[in-house]
Image (cartoon, rainbow, N blue to C red):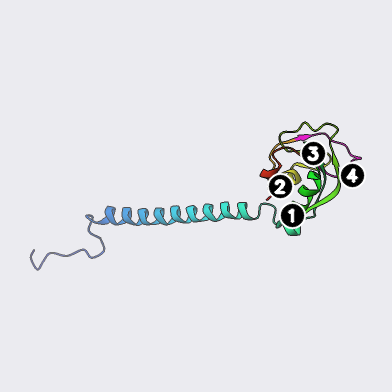
Amino acid sequence: MTMDEQIDLTTKPSGKKWSSKRGSWFLILAVVIVALAVGLYYRSINRKTASDGYSEDQLPAIKVVILNGCGYEQLASEFAAAMSHKNIEVVSLGDTPRPIYDKSIIVMRKGDKQDLERLQKMTGIQRWTSAMNEFHSAEFDIIVGRDYETYIK
């Protein structure tokens, strides 16, 4: 290079131009992906802990009739006593006409699916059926079967 040649200071060298832009885009893309992953994680946690926004003690008690379905003496009252610390209001106790139930079951009388899910969670009884009756004294019947020891803890 001689003294007479002019150097153009307004242009950048072309060798590093592409690789530096590519590195910046990868960095930005990585930050966006991490931010999305963290957001989805916290969103899923919030759904699990507060699906309806209330804890069980803030919701009204679920009214139930507890029926002895297997013929063991005083089983309905023992089951009611075991559920006394839960958010369940026992309206009445009784026996089924025939003691034929091997498995306990929840009968939905006038409750809704959301209350059914709450009751299933509180009692541990997953089996259920529907026999709607708007004049029934409670939202649900719980028929206690021979598997009662599974649910009385």
Q: Are marks 1 and 4 in contact (CB under 8 Å)?
A: no
Identify the mark nearer the N-term, 3 or 2.
Answer: 3
Question: Crowdedness of circle 1 by 10 Å Cα count: few (<14), some, many (20+)?
Answer: some
Stretch of the chain drawn in magenta:
129-143
Decide whether the magenta segment is chiefly helix, strand or loop: loop
Identify the mark nearer the N-term, 2 or 1.
Answer: 1
User: Which one is in front in this view, the residue at disc 1 or the one at disc 3?
Assistant: 1
Residue 57 at least partly seen: yes
What kind of residue is marked 1? Lys
Q: Position of residue 127 (x, y in %)?
A: 70, 37
Q: Position of residue 85 (x, y in %)?
A: 74, 57
Q: Are marks 2 and 1 in contact (CB under 8 Å)?
A: yes
Identify the mark nearer the N-term, 4 or 3.
Answer: 3
Residue underneath mark 3? 108
Residue underneath mark 4? 137
- Residue in the image at 74% along x and 37% along y: 145
- Residue in the image at 79% along x and 39% along y: 108
What kind of residue is marked 4? Ser
Q: CA distance from mark 2 to mark 4?
A: 20 Å
Q: CA distance from mark 3 to mark 2?
A: 14 Å
Question: Crowdedness of circle 4 by 10 Å Cα count: few (<14), some, many (20+)?
Answer: some
Name the secondary structure under disc 4.
Answer: loop
- Looking at this view, is 144 or 109 the one in front? 144
Residue underneath mark 2? 123
